[in-house]
Image (cartoon, helix red, strand yellow):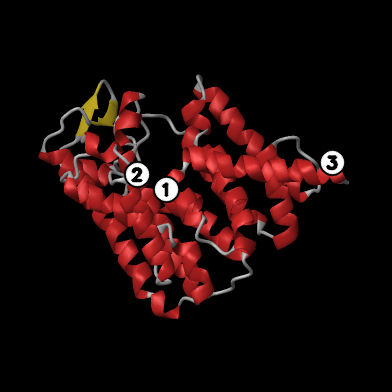
Amino acid sequence: MKGASTTLRSAFSFCVQQVRTYDYHHYLCLLELPPDMRKAAFALRAFNVETSKAMDVASDPRIGLMRLLWWQEAIDKIYSSKSIEQPVAQALASVISDHKISKGWLKRSVEARINDARRDPNDIPNSISELEKYAEDTVSTLLYTTLQSGGIRSTAADHAASHIGKASGLLLLLRSLPYHASKSRQGSYIPIEVALKHGLLVKEGGRSYVQLESREGSLSDAVFEMASVANAHLEKARQLAGTVPVEARPVLLPSVPAQVLLDTLRKVEFNVFDPRLSRGILGVPPLWYQMKVKWHSWRRKY
């Protein structure tokens, strides 16, 4: 029994370290959660880290896809009370058991990433709404499960979480454009409707792709259009603040890094290749970012 307890403590410690290493801006947000919610939140966020970086750290896309499929199967095993010798899975199993986390949200998240991993690099999303759906499935679901782990049942909180997740997801996709361009997934997260409008869609040899090499105004205009959709979601989330329970507001603190990233994009005039985007934390000094998170937390705002 003592050995099992030590293993579980090590698993949760591993989750905290994973989030601190790979998702530091959200790590600082989770530190503002009440102690009784923090452990579950770190396990859920570590699960997100595992699935979100599966394709990026794999030397071969097929290996990344296999990792995602492993997590899909792992969720089924956890809900069937089967043990898994992997620290994030062990911590997640404990959280699921203690807080009755909905299986559907976790499955929806990993399946969205599997579908994205299987997508051909030349298969471009048709509309921003497709990317909003992807953000809802991968980011909003994380907020839903965190609310659930805290025993918070609120339609207003869920609606705010939906908007914040969509905003965060869209902005992180924009931030990742240079990375995906370097991996030959040329503009794969700029949808056809936006690329056409701004003259970025190139048809060549029977295939279409979004041209990112041109860093002139057309690309910045496309990024601005998508960032404006994210901004609208943040505004809608804040309009709900008066109806969101006080205990739910710390869970919605990820709106702060989303706003910081949006502000940095404005500062660099929506040029995703500007090196200032990768400085500090989301383009701002670490101390300033930490103070901003603390200020929102202290005022019970998001």
Numbered badge on residue 184: none
In this view of the protein, which residue sits in the foreground, 282 or 202? 282
Q: Is residue 106 left or right of residue 7?
A: left
Quarter of the image where one finds residue 231: bottom left
Give the answer, above or below, for where 232 lies relative to 278.
Answer: below
Q: Position of residue 222 (x, y in %)?
A: 20, 45
In this view of the protein, which residue sits in the foreground, 277 or 179? 277
User: Label 1: few (<14), some or many (≥20) within 10 Å?
Assistant: many
| 3 or 1: mark nearer the eye | 3
Amino acid type at circle 3 is Gly
Numbered badge on residue 3: 3
Secondary structure beneath dot 2 equals loop
Q: Are marks 1 and 2 in contact (CB under 8 Å)?
A: yes
Please give the residue where the numbered disc 1 appears in the rendered image. 25
Q: Position of residue 223 (x, y in %)?
A: 23, 45
Q: Which residue is drawn at the image coordinates 67% and 59% (left, top)?
A: 101
Secondary structure beneath dot 3 equals helix
Secondary structure beneath dot 1 equals helix
Nearer the N terminus, badge 3 or badge 1? 3
Please give the residue where the numbered disc 2 appears in the rendered image. 281
The residues tagged by marks 1 and 2 sit, at their Cα atoms, a distance apart of 7 Å
Amino acid type at circle 1 is His
